[in-house]
Image: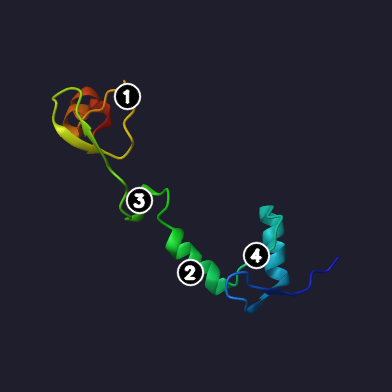
Amino acid sequence: MTLQDKAIQCSDCGVNFVFTAGEQEFFATKGYANEPKRCPTCRQSRRSTHSGEGNFNSGSTRQLFPAVCAECGKDTQVPFEPRLGRPVYCSDCYSKMRPDRQR
């Protein structure tokens, strides 16, 4: 069966775009079951606005939570929400306790 180019309407901006036979083959080799629902421009825009989510190396700021170090008592901030009954350490004390995890 020969694949043919398909015209698809973008779910975000409404413009029609072409889903080429080559792109369809690529999607099939990757195991993607669904066709794209956004045009290339909207896909790129969406990628750039969501690229930092869940990725600490993206340069985006991450939420920090206030905590008190269980070792030295110093006020600190940590990148996770502290749980009651679980000790939290400032970076200095954590480094002393876990020398194998130096920054």
Callout 3, which amino acid?
Asn
Res. 65 image quadrant: top left
Q: Can you say whether 14 is above or below 89 in the image? A: below
Q: Nearer the viewer, mark 3 or mark 1?
A: 1
Q: Which numbered disc flags the more N-terminal residue, 3 or 1?
A: 3
Q: Which numbered disc flags the more N-terminal residue, 4 or 2?
A: 4
Callout 2, which amino acid?
Ser
Q: Nearer the viewer, mark 2 or mark 3?
A: 2
Residue plotted at (42% across, 48% down): 54
Marks 4/2 in contact by CB < 8 Å: the verdict is: no
Query: CA separation, marks 3 and 4?
Result: 27 Å
Q: Which numbered disc flags the more N-terminal residue, 2 or 3?
A: 2
Query: CA separation, marks 4 and 2?
Result: 14 Å
Q: Nearer the viewer, mark 3 or mark 4?
A: 4
Q: Is residue 76 left or right of residue 44?
A: left
Query: CA separation, marks 3 and 1?
Result: 29 Å
Front-lying residue, 31 or 87: 87
**Residue identified by numbered label 3:** 57
**Residue lying farthest bottom?**
15
Q: Can you say whether 52 is above or below 63 in the image? A: below
What's the mark number on residue 45?
A: 2
Callout 1, which amino acid?
Leu
Q: Which numbered disc flags the more N-terminal residue, 1 or 4?
A: 4
**Residue identified by numbered label 4:** 36
Element under disc 4: loop
Res. 51 image quadrant: bottom left
**Residue identified by numbered label 1:** 84
Quadrant for the N terminus, please. Answer: bottom right
Q: Nearer the viewer, mark 1 or mark 4?
A: 1
Callout 4, which amino acid?
Pro
